[in-house]
Amino acid sequence: MTTEASHPLYVPLAPLAAPRAEEPRRRRRPPVPPAAPPVPALRLAPGRLRTGIAAGAGGVGLLWGLQARPSARLDVLFASGAHLTGLLAGYGVLVLLLLMARVPAVEHGVGADRLARRHALGGRYVLGLIAAHGVLALCGHAVHTHADLFTAAGDLLSYGAIAAATVGTALLVAVGITSARSVRRRLRHETWRAVHLGALLAAALGFVHQLAGPDIAGGLLTRWLWSLAHALVAVLLVWYRIVVPVRAALRHDLRVAEVRDEGPGVVSVLIRGRGVDHLRAEPGQFFRWRFLRRGLWATALPFSLSAPVRDDTLRITVKALGDHTRRVRRLRPGTRVLATGPFGALTAHRRTRRKVLLLAGGVGITPLRALFETLPGGPGDVTLLYRAPDAASVVLREELEAIARERRAALHFLLGPSDGSFDPLAPRALRNLVPDLAAHDVYLCGPPAMARAATASLRRAGVPAARIHSEDFDRA
């Protein structure tokens, strides 16, 4: 009878757990100059973000309630509904822009992929509110003027503020359509990004419309607060998406130092600059990289750090999966680099247990390799499982083995096709590899299908959802 431990897809590295006394003496690395202790990054907890957004929505509802006129007239009821949905839609647009402003406290506390998911979900709600606002306003005007819907629509569009809002709505609908997975897969990233910039113009046109409406224009304090909220979000967008990256580029002067082959279609890029430790990058985080060479400068590519920061050097490891990633392997030393970040919440900050399991799939090993080296813990506290289709697909194997020997940590390569008869990520297989699995924190990074399957297996194996930490860098 074949057990999981004897199956050919399961490759344990038993010697890695051997006591250090039995290992051959190896040359010590030169000591790394100590860096100044980093200031702890500010983090906004996801719960507090949700509470803040809900409180803001409640404030908008209160603003509407204070100005609403109780009436049983049909046109007034339509108008009241239009005012409420319009205010909530305007507030929703501000929240969507804030989520994508790349504010470090929000990014580090919530995680870039969660923010992207909430942004996408919120966009659907906002479009629904805008549609409801338009329909209710149209019906209310038609009832009030005793006109048909077509005549009422033409009458409303004669007002400049309403025409501006209509153009803004069309831009937001275009953003929503291009964000659908089936459409986005067919678009170049540059095209998708250009369409999304239209959301900024849509927000500005919506603001013009809101200032002309009775809910905002009705009082000086209301206009001031609404304008202040828009100004604050605009400042955050300009500061963190333009000023901070440009300032970092001038301050750190990042350039490609070396491009190393790591395996078939995989390279590591070493990027060196001045005062890189001031970036306060943590293992597990990622940057958005813009390489200033033809074919790459127009796109910011999200790649996680595959090693801790050392000697003013950052390292990323990239697998050729598309046009942009294939061009990365042809980078020349000296190429200037613009890096925005660090971003992401897949860091030691999420740890809640002494024992940690790192579960990687494919090139998802890159952030976990940095965590494998740096997470505090004694022998047996940290375990790394690396899922790959075959031995040739394993990235950074020698480094992983060296780290495991140095730390006396457990390391297992789980090799075999994803459609094979034996699933090394099944609950029973995971419990055989990690007997006290339910007592671990789990850091997970890999292709989306693998991550979903692994998450389901971990839950069935007894790991609470709150202790499964993952981040989808493709969504970030």
Image (cartoon, grey):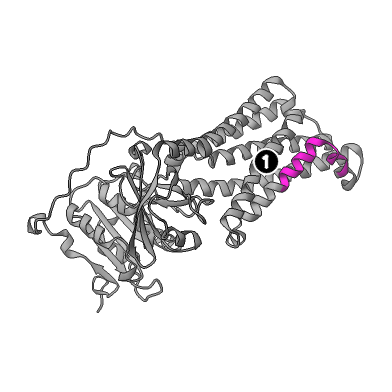
Q: Nearer the viewer, residue 227 or 335?
A: 335
Instruction: Kindly report the secondary structure that dominates the magenta region of the rendered protein.
Output: helix
Q: Quadrant of residue 459?
A: bottom left
Q: Nearer the viewer, residue 45 or 188?
A: 188
The residue drawn where x is 14% and y is 50% is 28
Instruction: Answer with left or right where residue 260 lies relative to residue 251.
Output: left
Above/below status of 81 relative to 458? above
Instruction: Answer with left or right where residue 71 lies relative to residue 464.
Output: right
Q: How many marks?
A: 1
* Badge 1 amino acid: Leu
Q: Position of residue 165 (x, y in %)?
A: 75, 40
Above/below status of 311 relative to 227? below
Mark 1, secondary structure of its residue: helix
Q: Residues within 10 Å of mark 1 (few under 14, many from 20)?
A: some
Instruction: Answer with left or right where residue 122 lies relative to residue 444.
Output: right
Q: Which residues are magenta?
A: 154-170
Q: Quadrant of residue 206?
A: top right
Residue extending farthest right: 146
The residue drawn where x is 13% and y is 59% is 18
Is residue 458 shown to the viewer in this render? no
Residue extending farthest top: 220
The residue drawn where x is 92% and y is 40% is 146
Above/below status of 189 relative to 156? below
